[in-house]
Image (tube, rainbow, N blue to C red):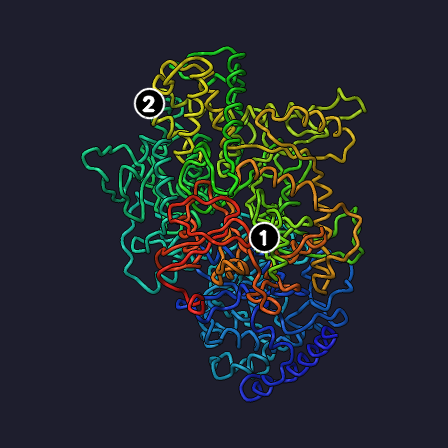
Amino acid sequence: MSGGRGRGGGEKRGNERHHGRGRGKQGKKHSGGRGSSNNNRQPKNPRSQPQSTSSKRRKKILLLHGNRQTGEILLGRIDKLKKTLLRDFDLDVVAPDAPHFFSDGIDFDCDDTVGRDGVTDDSTWQRTWWHRRENTYQGMEESMYMLHQLWSDDNLEFESILGFSQGSRLAHFIAIIHTITNGAAFPGLKSVVHFSGYGDVPLPDNFCKSLSDEWREAIPSFILAKLDGSDQNYNFDDVRTNVGSLHVMGEKDTLIPLKSSEALLKWYVQPSVYIHPGNHFVPVKRQDIEKYVEFFNDMTKQTQQYADSADGDEKLAIKDEEENNQQSNISTTAAPPDEEHAQAHIDEVAALTQIFPVEFSLLSNSTPRDPENYDPDDYFEENRIYEHPIKYSILLQPQDSLDPSEEQLWPPKNISLGIQYPAEYPDVSPSISLIHDMNYFEFSLAASDALMDVVRKAMSEELGMPCVMGMIYAARDFFEGGQLALCAKTNSTKTPSHDVDADVGEPPEVENCPTSSTSALLRKSSPSRIKECNAQGLQIASAMLGRVNLSDDGEAAIDGTTAGGKGGTWRYTVGLVGKPSAGKSTFFNAATAFARQKGEGGGEAYCEDKTIDDDEDSGIILGGASMAPHPFTTIDPNIGYCLVPAPGICPEDAEGGRKKIAEMGLTLGSSHGRDSHGRRFIPVCLKDVAGLVPGAYQGRGRGNKFLDDLTDADVLVHIVDASGSSDAEGNKLCNSGNSDDLNHPLNDLEWVRSELVEWVYSNVTAKWDSITRRGKEKLVGMFSGYKQSQAFTYDVFSAVEKFVTEKEGREHMFEQLENWDEGDLHRLVSAFLGARFPMALALNKQDIPSSKQYINDIESKLPIHGAHIGVGVSAHEEMKFIRHHLTLAIKTSSNDSSLSQQKSTVLNMDGGVWDCLQSAVSLRQPTLVFPVNDMQTYEPLPGMTNYATRDSSLPNRGFISCILAAGGSAPSQWNGKNMYVPSTKGDVKHALRDALLMKPGSTVEDVFVSLKGLGVLEGEFVRAEKSFQIGQKPKPASKNEQVATGLILRIMTTRRKKWQTNY
């Protein structure tokens, strides 16, 4: 087999290099006979390969994997870091494989796969940078030669190195050589990040000879004299490198203890150190990513200061974050945002002005649309035209509800958060700054740094979504939680993150919680009326959810109730809610195939040397959401892509659709694959947040932080412990066999719904005085602040007003807010939440005997407490299925078709989780539009190839193996082995491959704008053709025509991209 030949070749090359073959003339002899190592000069992962055709060449970071790894595996483990480096610093990560295959007979380096008691049978894929015998690193010279060749490639421009364990050791050698040769070796090297590096062992015996042989002409004479003299093992103790360095160490790392990593620090001038609490892996939790971003920001700043010494004077009044965002191309001269992003900017500004009317100040320019009727307090786009980039500030001190007793928690003067939108926000982070006129004694740098840490944390948690409201609340929580005083006590230059995030305690118990924050202007209601009004709100929401349908010919027939608002691409998000320990994180891991890299598995996969037992852990750390049977295992939101069987009717699902495709000789495609029933998968973002507990709206548990996280969701899945084996706070109950010892899941449904209602209700009543003064528009703005369009909010208001007029005979209720009682507001909140967050139930733990009676009971009562659909699931069993097949995908070196044939006694994935997600999405369906290049063959637009092969929502190899094992089919562009390819075997054009998720009410023009945003189309809209059935003659489609699910659409433009010139 090729693996065996490769291993032998690696050993031979290592021995040849050890016997003195160097660079230059002798090196040329090597270049012709390097064997399989030539294949490793470029990363295996096609997504990390350089794009030589790009007009702007991105700089690169070299990633060096550990012993018994490959570049592809480590790159997959640090995917979040890779995306951050690309997004924030425009840096591509290149991850080559080491040129030598690992051989357990001659290798004695530390095992960077962690946790193996022996050697697995399938180890032929494992690579190493050298074979170590005592203190000789055989093959080190060849690895160095290969990397320098890669570094010197004219098509690449490297500036940094990330090295893990053995890769860190190699990166250290490179840094020394770079320093000794005054930059001749590995030119342009600016920084090195050592993950689990070590410096408590001497340099290898063959290092000095290698250095002398290969870089003699570039080495200073005084060092060369030592190398050529009697000190053949010169250890360079007097050498210090100015290469920037970050040393990442694991507190529990047993392979590379802290002392070993700390011994590396002496070689570097001003090294940075970050100690994480985990073991031997590359940590990629949110807080870890923040440290790496901070380091690269510092490196960028130092480079800029070196290049441009004319820095302007900095004002103490502003701690500007814009320098940190220069890598994201944020500047006042940046290109304006496209239509979709510009609309997102304006919508968020308008919503924020409703929530923070007094605190908000627009800093950028805008002009009135109608000067005669201009309202300076109206920030909606109907009233003004914005100049981009939009800049504004929001005063952090609440101006209408600051209790005098809380004034001591705040600085003596006002402090605001400044915001500037980059063109691609919210896909990238905004530029942020603190604005105040306090001196150091009034507001210290320690407090400033600690506050900015909290704000950045909130910003990073909502990346890809509007995040300003979350940042404001996080900043207010910082002050109201007493962190300002804590900063003064510690007298530190930066408040530790664990202090910033410390729980400041629970609020005092308050009687009659529903009315504890009620304004005096809102008349009181009896508990029975509040309960009745809440139920009426749910009735209104249910009626609204049922008013979207299709006419017989497939055209949209929407009455305007739920389809109101602007259309466009829908970044669909499903939120997981429920009490602690109900199984949310388990459900998340099953649905996303451990997409989120959490816990000690965040950076390093490993396998045990044993047969995988379906009833035991596989020994592979797969990441994902952390899980444990106690509250708050998930502290920060877990976010990842999942696949959902498409709701509604796709063209191929219509009567006779698949038969017609077969008769026409076409191959049906799908960008993300299909399940065993042939249902098309669509990508959906899944968000799992910390467990909810009673009283969260008052601050208990994770409190409003949990509830704020939900505003990103479009629908909710309530994970219910259907077994009744835990109480309301997730604590396990003793089960003596008596049902009285258990907690009926209906109780959980009731209080979870109540928490959501009281959260919004308390927010609105806190500003009720202002609302009654400013009227309906202010109230609309308050509700639109929950990341929902004004048109949607108006729809809810109209439905509520109509209901009250019919039931109580009260007309124009929104013009008489001063006459409202608590029941009126509860009805409105209940209706809004029911329509804004429709809910499905995942009746989890159905495999436990006590669940059966509870599931039957719940299903017989649906809809209830805001839930419309219930699906029985066993998330743990489905997660075991996923873990089992992910393990096989990692351990096997065969192709994917063999993966699907592996025998398993684990429960099939094709069931509860996917069905539950589909049920949830069906409550608020996106409009699926199918863009094609030809209305006869339905072949995809060539410009969509990048989406179908490189998009971050595509399932990886492990996830695909799970789909295949469940009886489904892989994505169309998957080559059946280990990668996505632009062209499949025989260059088959897959019909109806791509589906766009559009918001209800979207038009043909919205689809056109979305395709332009993806870089698929250019120019101006000319015309479009449509059809709803396969084989149907296409009809013209107007620009302003609404689209509906199942629409097949071809759009023609005035300008053609390169791929269009052939069509």
Q: Give the structural element (helix, strand or loop) at label 2.
A: loop
Asked whether 892 or 37 is in front, the reply is: 892
Could you tell me residue 896's position as x and y percent? 70, 61
The residue labelled by disc 2 is 775
Could you tell me residue 545's position as x and y percent? 52, 31
Q: Is residue 471 above or below residue 112?
A: above
Q: Earlier in the sequence, mark 1 or mark 2?
A: 1
The residue labelled by disc 1 is 283
Asked whether 565 or 259 is in front, the reply is: 565
Quadrant of the image occupied by residue 121: bottom right
Could you tell me residue 795's position as x and y percent? 42, 30
* Point 59% across, 68% down: residue: 44
Give the foreground label among 1 and 2: 2
Q: Quadrant of the C terminus?
A: bottom left
Q: Is residue 994 above or below residue 188?
A: above
Asked whether 528 or 222 is in front, the reply is: 528
Residue 889 appears left or right of 310: right
Q: Residue furthest left?
A: 372
Amino acid, disc 2: Gly
Q: Quadrant of the N terminus?
A: bottom right
Q: Which mark, residue 144?
A: none
Could you tell me residue 910's position as x and y percent? 70, 46
